[in-house]
Every structure is written in C-alpha cells, then in structure tokens.
Amino acid sequence: MKRLGLFLFVSIMFSVVHAQYKSPVINPDNSVTFHVYAPNAEEVKLKGSFAEPSILKIKTKAGTFGKDKTYSLKKEGDWWSYITKPLTSEMYTYKFVIDDEDCLDSLNINKIRDVDAFFNYFIIDGVPGSMYKTQDVAHGKLEKVWYPSNLNGMKQRRLYIYLPAEYDRNSGKRYPVLYLLHGSGGDETSWSDYGKACEIMDNMIAQGKAEPMIVVMPNGIVNLDAAPGESPYMDAKPTSNNVSSMMGKVEKVFVDEVVTFIDQQYRTQNDKAHRALAGLSLGGLQTIYISANHPEVFDYVGLFSAQTTNTLDNDVISRVKNVFNKVANIKSLFGKDSDPNGIEGIDTYKDFDIKLKAQFDAKPKLYYIAVGEEDFVKKLNDDFRLKLDAAGYKYEYNETDGSHSWENWRKYLLDFLPRIFK
Amino acid sequence: MKRLGLFLFVSIMFSVVHAQYKSPVINPDNSVTFHVYAPNAEEVKLKGSFAEPSILKIKTKAGTFGKDKTYSLKKEGDWWSYITKPLTSEMYTYKFVIDDEDCLDSLNINKIRDVDAFFNYFIIDGVPGSMYKTQDVAHGKLEKVWYPSNLNGMKQRRLYIYLPAEYDRNSGKRYPVLYLLHGSGGDETSWSDYGKACEIMDNMIAQGKAEPMIVVMPNGIVNLDAAPGESPYMDAKPTSNNVSSMMGKVEKVFVDEVVTFIDQQYRTQNDKAHRALAGLSLGGLQTIYISANHPEVFDYVGLFSAQTTNTLDNDVISRVKNVFNKVANIKSLFGKDSDPNGIEGIDTYKDFDIKLKAQFDAKPKLYYIAVGEEDFVKKLNDDFRLKLDAAGYKYEYNETDGSHSWENWRKYLLDFLPRIFK
C-alpha cells in the first residue's frame, strides 16, 4: 500500500507541474489567451476561424473559402503566447503553425475533424455559443445506424439519427423529421460533430424554439459509405472535391432509400407536412434536386450556402459526360466509385425548371435560402433567387456576414428550426 | 458551365499529383510501407504499436506501459520512407516523430484518440485484424445516450449502447447484456473507437461465435460525465491518473444507476444469468468490486489486464484518506470533482474477502482473468489468482504475449464473448 500512496502523490504532483499553463483561456472580457510550448521554434503562429472585430470582414476568394486568419505568437522563455481582442459568442476553430508546420494545441482536448484534417476548438458563451454546448436540459440520443442501399454497389450505408429526449417516454407519439445534409468533404458525422446538431436540438427544444423532432443525418458522398474508420473501404478518404457526388446519384435514391428506411424504423409522421430537408453547400445542391424531384415529399426546404448551380440544366449534361470521359482512366481516385462514367443519376438534374414549377405549384410551406455576403457561392445564390423571383416563387431569405463556414451553418440551423413544423 | 468543367478537371488533376504516395501501404507480404513529406527535417522516426517478429518481446516497465517501438525513416528527395518486416494480423497504431515533434500521418485518414492524444492506425487482415473491420454482415447500431445520475453532482452522464442487428426486427425478444468498462484515461467512446467493439460484435454474432446481445459502455470516470466536447465541463480533460475514480464512487452507484436504467429503457433479460460485466485496467478494478458487492447481479465477470489491487482492503482505507487529506488544497486538478476528500464510495472496497466469498458462494457461471505476460499488472494478477486459488474459487485464465495494450484488450473481448450467455 505504500506503493499506492506514493503513486497517488506522484501522479498529483506531476499534474501540478504540467498545469502551469492552460490553453486556451477565455478571459472575463472574452479575449482568449493561447499558450504553446515550443522552446526551439523560430516562429509560432495561430490560424483561427475567428477574426477580431476590427478586422471582421475577411474577403475570401472562390476556392479558398474558410481560409483562417493568421496571428503571430510572442515568445517568453520556452513558451509562446497570444491574446486576442474580445471575441463575440461563437464556437471557433484554430491550429498552431510552428515553423511552418501545422500543429494542434496539446493543452486543449477539444478537437474536431473537418474533411481530412483536425482542428482545436473552443466556445465563447452567450448567443449563439451556448447553444452549441451541453446544457442542463433533457438530452435526446444519437443513433449510428446502417441502412440498406443500392447506391454505388455498396449494400449498406451509414446515417446518424437524433431522437428527441421525449421519444422514448412517449411510445405512442409520432414525430416530424428533419433530413439534414452535409457538404462536400463531410459525412454522416459532420452535423453532429462540427455542427453540434445534438446540442442545438436539445437546447432549442428545451427553450421551446423547436418542435420535438427526429433529425436524420445521412452520408451523402457516393464513394464513401461511412465516416473514416467505420467504412469497409479503409483507404477511401474524404475530400472537398467529390465530383462523383455531384452527378445526381445521391439525389436519385434518397427518398426511396433513406426516407423509406426512416419511416419504416422510427415513429415518424410520414407525410409532406411533417418532413423538412435542408443541406449545406453540396448538401444544398442535393436538397434543391431531391425536393424538386419529389414535390409531394417535403414541405420545408432549407438551402444553407447551397451550391445552387442553377446553371446545371439540360445542356450541361453532355459537358459533364465529356469531363468524365477524359478522366475515365484514373478510376482509382474515386475510391469505391468503380464507375466514374456511371452518371446514371444525371437524370435527376434534367428538366429542372419544369420540376421546380411543379414543386412550387404544390405550395411548399417554406423554401428557405441562407448565405453569407462573402461566401463564394453568394453569386450563385443571387442568380438562383433571380430565377425564383422571375417565376414568382416565394421563399424566405437570410443573408448574413461571413463566408462558407460552420459558424454560418450552425446559425442557419438555429434560424431554420423555429420556422418548421409549426 | 465552362467553369464547372474546368473545376472538375483541375480538381481531378490536383488529386492525381498528390496521389503519388500513399501511406501506409500494406504490401502483399504484410510488410507495411510508410511515406512522409518532410523536405527540411533532419530526422524522421516512426513510433508504432507493432513490433517486428524478431523483436516481438519488448519489456515494458511499470508506468511506461504501451510505450511504442521507434524506427528511423530514410530520406529520398523530399520524402522519407520506412518498410517494416511482415506484420501479423492486427490493428496497429503509430505516429511520426519529425525532428523530435510528434506528427500524425496526413496521408492516413484513420485516426483515433487515446486519453488526450491522437494516433494513426491501420489494420492487417486475417485473424484477428479482420474482426475489427466493417464486414459485409448485418450491422447493429450504436446509441449515444444520457442517463440520470447522482454521481459527483452531475445530473446526467453519458453511455454508449450497442444493439445487435436483429434488435429492431424482433420487437418481442429480450436480450442479455454485457457491461463493458474502459480504463483510466478512457471514456464511453473507448470501446467503440479504439476497441472496435461494434465491429467485433457484428462479426462475432454473424459468425455464430457470440449470442446476439446488448453491450453497454458507460463513462467510468468520476470527474468526466462524457467524452471531450460533449460534456458541459469543456475544460475537463482525460488523464491516465484518475485518482478520484479509484475511490469506489463509480462502483457504488453502478448497479442502481446504470443497470437500472438499461433494464428500464431496453428489452433486456434482466436477471443474473443474462448479465455480464467486464472491464480493462481501471475498468477491471471496478468490475471486481461491482461484481463482489452484487453477487446476485452478474453471472459472468471478465477482468482484462485488471488493476486487481487486492492489497486494497480495510487497513488501506485510512491510508487513502491520508493521501487525499495531503492534497486537499489542489482541488482544481479534479475538474468537476469538487470534493476530492469525498471518498464516500470507499465502503465499496471494505470487507472484500467476505464479499468475494459471497460472490463465489453464489456460483458465478464465469470468472475470467486475462493478462499479458509483460503487463505491469501481471504481478498483481498473479497475486490475485493466488488468493482465488487459496480459497478454491474457480476461474478461467488467459495469459497472452504482450503488455497493457488495446491489441490485448480487443483479443480478450474476442476470447470472452463465446464464453458468455451460452
């Protein structure tokens, strides 16, 4: 037992020595202090999704969306530090750059994956930040489920489902369903991890701002059936360039596979009035086409920084085929997507104007568009709205600061939820 | 549309250029090639959980358990590489060390957290490796759930539940339950992430080697209610030194809180014959005391590299109190554990010999002990077995190669599953 006492004591003393710095520290004025141990580094920088108020408007160029602002740290002894100006309430991501090498903050346990890279994050309390934290409210549960699929020769695909806290207590009650789609580079984990969808749902329901609902978060990438590590195809990597996922295949099978599965397995209200579909970026593109091809299925439609690509209509399809023919010899790029020429989903994009008319003739309760004023898809969204305006189709529009970022997508979800199933 | 064609083409070409190397590459003879881009580095090493057959027996010292073997990479141009000798089937973890700085393999998307650090991993097919991969079999689902708890002043705590594939198809059927506990430094995510418990269950059930069962994976750390990012206490960090979790608190409330919740919420077979409890390391310690305090609850008990600490009996308790009194002034180390003096759970450890006798008098169907021959808890397990032998208590014993590692814990689960609920 002497040994146990010594072990406890040494353990505790060890922790004390290493606890001399924390990082990040959120100061009372909401400035944030970062510390990093790098005795031999020549230069340490910080790349963060936050911009200090004085320099809030960072112009992003198409293709460099989400580029983080960089700050230089100051050396004191073996440690480097940086203090931001006071930050507004938000969930922010960051990394250190030590002598040009990206490094995570080893003092911050909160890390998150985006596409194929990890970031640290922290949350500044207030609105909206506190909505992204686990609060002392009733918690729903998250289920990680496989469902049968014929997409791309995979027999089963993965989706995540949020069930509201009351779901298990009310075994006779049926619930409306929000289908929430991720972007290119994302997967079924994106909305619950980076998007904090479960925390948002718990908090919004607890505050009476959202109806208790089921939220379904499928994997919308053709050549990935599940997030890394959970797919049988362990080499298949997320990438921001999911060309094969822009060919209509996901859209084509969505209602038959995903909606049918959910209606069979869960206590859903299985009619149009109780189904919403929303997606960000690529998921926004998918939302447009899935909902237009199925005017009878969704009463609420949400486009968050959508790749509206309203240029994608009939005359485009032959050009897409051309591009694919050119690259047919580099199949392996597409992971399990053994048939990059297989654009059998492309019909989903055909005759879009006719389909859109049918969708609006069927009078959806909400067609919602949100985009940041500096988003690289802003122009595409402007064009898309002109098209809707010209046809006299009603929609709600939310234009915000900022660009193509999770800061915006989480806010759009907060804004969208009170508008559905009312 | 010209723009879309160009975008697709550039995207694809970009991928081709960067695809010149993959890492890791599993060669036909199961040697593994690593590549890392580090043009300016002076030295690049690889730390891996694998040992080549010729040097398989690495001695670990108490306290340095799980220490990885280090290999030097060779430079060619801007890239460094290393080829291992052929490896046996397994899931292996590794990291690069570039000029003394730990770095993940940016070419390998498969990453996993252990305590507060991330590692890359890869799987060599065969036995047991293929058991850790998603196969083309029926998949169960994983639920991330909050349950009510009075432990440490937190109102709700997190647990993960695996439900077998047939659970939703057989709404009239009830299932046996395996409670699976993690080690110090772990949390409710450990068994499903690092332990590949869902893949193991799916594959073992599909092969008829395990009964369809519910697997419950709670968080057994007193001052953490949930894994990082999902707890309201965002500063609370996993650590290997969970002193406050060795004071009997978790053991004391386990049956009342966790088992009761599971029996209420799921279709369990809620009797002793259909409950198993197993844990690794700290979870093994908890398994010993939970099962000994409740001889009527679990018929199957599994100790995987357990911290058996059979030295911990009545005369020890006052010494533990002393240690805690000494460090009472550094409360903040314990995160939300506002009362490090609060050893109200310590009674769970009292009168262990009497409790153990009652447990074996009640004839458990299985008392299973597994440990690696080079594990730092091997001696403790030897002593514990001597105690069982002396009393004539029957147990099954599985001594393996290796030390205190997930390689062993996954294998112990594979070995344990066919022995329960038969």
Image: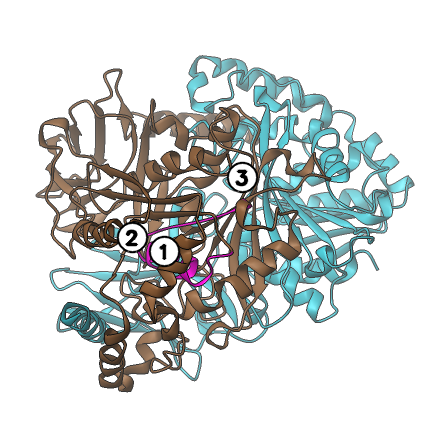
Chain colours: A brown, B cyan
Separation of marks 1 and 2 at Cα, in angstroms: 7 Å
- The tally of labels here is 3
- Marks 3 and 1 belong to one chain: no
Disc ID at residue B184: 3
1 and 2 marks in contact (CB < 8 Å): yes
Residue A371, position as x, y percentages in the image = 25, 44
Disc ID at residue A283: 1
Kind of residue indicated by mark 1: Gly
Residue B321, position as x, y percentages in the image = 60, 17
Separation of marks 3 and 1 at Cα, in angstroms: 40 Å
List the residue tagged with mark 2.
A306
A37 vs A43, left or right, is right
Kind of residue indicated by mark 2: Ala
> On what subunit does the disc labeled 1 rest?
A
* 2 or 3: mark nearer the eye: 2
Front position in the image: A180 or A134: A180
- Name which residue lies at 65% across and 36% down: B309
Disc ID at residue B290: none
Separation of marks 2 and 3 at Cα, in angstroms: 44 Å
Magenta region: which residues? A274-296
Is A279 magenta? The answer is yes
- Marks 1 and 2 belong to one chain: yes
Front position in the image: B395 or B366: B366
- Name which residue lies at 53% across and 50% down: A272
| Secondary element at tag 1 | helix
